[in-house]
Amino acid sequence: SKAFFPFHHVSDSSRAEFTIDRILGLDRQEQPGQVKPYRPWTGGSLRPSSTISSPSCKPINVLCLPSSKGQEVKAEGPIQQLPPLNWYVGRRPRTAFTGMQIEVLESIFQVNSYPGIDLREELAQRLHLDEDRIQIWFQNRRAKLKRSHRESQFLMVKNTFTSLQT
Amino acid sequence: SKAFFPFHHVSDSSRAEFTIDRILGLDRQEQPGQVKPYRPWTGGSLRPSSTISSPSCKPINVLCLPSSKGQEVKAEGPIQQLPPLNWYVGRRPRTAFTGMQIEVLESIFQVNSYPGIDLREELAQRLHLDEDRIQIWFQNRRAKLKRSHRESQFLMVKNTFTSLQT
DNA sequence: TTTTAATATAATGTC
DNA sequence: GACATTATATTAAT
């Protein structure tokens, strides 16, 4: 009964059991199940990723990942005894788009920065990519455009201000 | 996310203007009077004549159009002529909760995922946050928990299926 | 060092 | 309030 979350509406803080002090007092228990993200590309064997290790340890899962280029074979002498527990196990290997894929995506982006599911699916099929990659690409592309827009506006304001001073 | 969140979007790829071939054909030419990209943050571009799935607007201080999600809005009689004018202008800057605030919110969440207004107000006062932020936090937190439940169920089913095959 | 794919999550709109 | 989707800050790979 500890890791169960009742989806019932408990009235409010007027009940003594739900006073903040009370709740915070009886906290300190085991955190029930850190939420596991959905990572279809992993084998489903996710490690409790709450263990953050030092950034010096090299990922051991690189070898299992498809996109590894093999430059990771550098054998540093003393092998780390304890499992490094890399802090990004489960992260999707970075996709490397081809120039042709980028070209098409950019072309579409110029016309439609918010492609719906159908266009994304069609693009995925055409470009041999997952639809998720397409969606992420457009999200990041929009952010990039917005960033550049912000910067140019900042420059404009700055230049105006500067020329007013001269 | 595709498997778990069946999106219901505009089938824009079926529209001639957004066929990939068509887009790639008129690429880089910027033909006069043609579709302009929908770039809400520039404030300079108009929404193209056809419906692009996009979020709707928040009537904070901005004049904007009602949403055109597409599939419901088939053919409205009078064409709405006003420009969409940035649905994100006036968007609240993303709140960065402190570790201590998260800790308290998580503790409360473990006991009560549906805090009533009184508890929310008390939390707001204690954590120096607005009550709306608390409410939004709990909404997003519930969604996250639900996602994790869906995911673990999916994993269970998948593992069962896999072990049945061995 | 720079760019950007991927992640996590706060905010928004529609129901 | 649920849900889908967005914007955005961050992380990490190139």
Image (spheres, coloured by chain):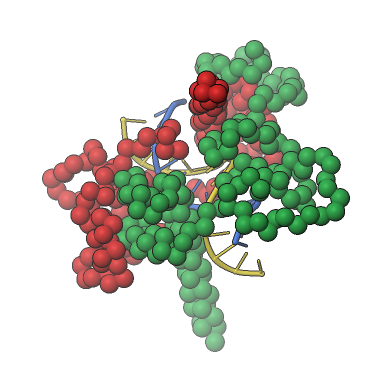
Chain colours: A green, B red, C yellow, D blue
Q: Residue at x 28, y 44 (%)?
A: B10
> To which quarter of the image does residue A42 belong?
top right
The residue sitting at the left extreme is B77
Which corner quadrant holds the C terminus of chain B? top right
* Horizontal arrangement in the rendering, residue B3 relative to residue B147 (left or right): left
Q: Residue A77 versus residue A29: which sits nearer the camera?
A: A77
Q: Nearer the viewer, residue A33 or A17?
A: A33
Residue lying farthest to the right in this orientation = A78
The quadrant of the picture occupied by the N terminus of chain B is top left
> Which residue does the image show at 41% across and 60% down from the upper left?
A101
Residue appearing at x 51%, y 82% in the figure: A164
Q: Is residue A47 rendered to the left or right of residue A41?
A: right
In the orientation shown, which residue stands out farthest toward the front?
Answer: B166
Percent position of residue A46, x then y? 64, 34
**Left or right: where A149 falls relative to D12:** left
> What is the total number of numbered labels drawn onto the structure image?
0
Where B85 sits versus B155, above or below? below
* Residue A106 visible in the displayed image: no
**Nearer to us in this view, C4 or B115:** C4
Name which residue lies at 46% across and 54% down.
A137
Asked whether residue A99 is in view, the answer is yes
B64 shown above or below B120: below
Task: Relative to A94, say whether B107 is above or below.
Answer: above
Residue A155 position in % (x across, y down): 51, 73
The location of residue B100, given as percent across then percent down, is: 71, 37
Q: Position of residue B88 (x, y in %)?
A: 42, 51
